Image: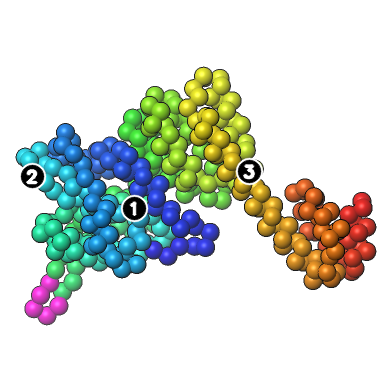
């Protein structure tokens, strides 16, 4: 999967965690016919070690959200589920072949045919892979698998809002994250709406924490929007006396905001210092200390003003003002 430079390298990870947290709910939401065949009273086994052995090459092995799961049918027989989660910005032509490759490796390793399922999270309404086939002189092959397209749930929004299955919220989060990429204010509002939904559905603390982690990871906010989001969420919690995302959890998020703000400030200061060194020459420690103590707004002003500087004296005059 090709990733843009500003994408999180492990963007599949929140999907993997939420799938494992409520695997039965995931199957019932996305693949109800398959879920109906499973005996949920028997243990579920995630075959992580086996799957890593099946996919040693980097191209396939980096697909963090893929799940290989052993469950039992209602008749008592064990079955292998291959859950493939495709989280990427663009469709991938080799995807059907990769699904087929997985199946061949699973059959060879377990001597058992898996059920192949895919969740497609891309934004292309026309990309709907569900088959791999080829024909050569004297032979042919056709492999079909079941795929669900999250984009299709846009037309079923009322169903999502009415559903008590936690994966309705998961899908709503994914869709709104796609829709609000270029609208930070709208994203902040939708993130708050989705978090409120967790409280209003009456989920237990563990479910709220896990869903909150998913929403928080997928719906990334700017530092400014994060502060506004937390302020509004605190007010909401206090009004309804629902202190779920507080204490240790909240401190962790607040610390993350502070650390990111500090990193952003340091990057901005470093850039301005490099520009000043090229513009007016080497800066002494006295001036460097003054620049280090500037606020974010003052640094932004300096970043604009420095283009008019011709010497260190110009910088000194600006700092004295």
Q: Main SS type for the magenta part?
A: strand
CA gap between label 1 and label 2 equals 26 Å
- The answer to which image quadrant residue 189 occupies is top right
Q: Circle 2: is it few (<14), some (14-19), or many (20+) Cα within 10 Å? A: few
Mark 1 = which residue?
A: 65
Q: Which mark is residue 258?
A: 3
What x and y, as percent, mark residue 222?
60, 46
Mark closer to the chain start, 1 or 2: 1
- The answer to which image quadrant residue 75 occupies is top left
CA gap between label 3 and label 1 equals 30 Å
Residue 120 visible? The answer is: no
**Span of residues in magenta:** 136-140
Report the residue that reaches farthest toward the left: 75
Identify the image quadrant of the N terminus: bottom left
What x and y, as percent, mark residue 169?
39, 37
Q: Which mark is residue 77?
A: 2
């Amino acid at each position: 999967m090709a990733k843009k430079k500003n994408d999180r390298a492990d963007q599949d990870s929140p999907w993997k965690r939420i799938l494992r947290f409520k695997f039965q709910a995931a199957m019932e939401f996305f693949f109800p016919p398959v879920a109906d065949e499973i005996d949920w009273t028997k243990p579920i086994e995630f075959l992580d070690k086996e799957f890593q052995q099946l996919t040693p090459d980097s191209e396939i092995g980096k697909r963090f959200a893929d799940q290989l799961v052993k469950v039992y049918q209602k008749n008592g027989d064990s079955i292998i589920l291959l859950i493939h989660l495709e989280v990427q910005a663009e469709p991938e032509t080799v995807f059907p072949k990769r699904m087929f490759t997985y199946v061949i490796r699973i059959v060879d390793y377990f001597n058992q045919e898996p059920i192949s399922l895919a969740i497609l999270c891309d934004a292309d309404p026309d990309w709907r892979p569900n088959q791999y086939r080829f024909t050569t002189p004297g032979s042919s092959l056709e492999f079909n698998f079941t795929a669900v397209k999250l984009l299709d749930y846009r037309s079923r929004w009322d169903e999502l809002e009415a559903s008590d299955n936690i994966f309705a919220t998961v899908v709503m989060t994914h869709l709104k994250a796609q829709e609000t990429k270029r609208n930070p204010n709208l994203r902040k509002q939708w993130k708050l709406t989705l978090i409120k939904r967790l409280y209003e559905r009456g989920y237990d603390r563990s479910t709220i924490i896990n869903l909150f982690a998913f929403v928080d990871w997928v719906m990334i906010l700017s530092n400014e929007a994060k502060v506004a989001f937390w302020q509004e969420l605190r007010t909401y919690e206090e009004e309804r006396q629902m202190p779920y995302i507080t204490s240790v959890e909240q401190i962790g998020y607040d610390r993350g905001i502070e650390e990111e703000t500090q990193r952003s400030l340091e990057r901005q200061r470093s850039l301005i210092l490099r520009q000043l060194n090229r513009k007016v020459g080497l800066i002494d420690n006295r001036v460097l200390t003054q620049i280090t103590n500037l606020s974010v707004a003052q640094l932004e002003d300096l970043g604009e003003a420095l283009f008019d500087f011709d010497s260190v004296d110009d910088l000194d005059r600006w700092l004295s003002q």
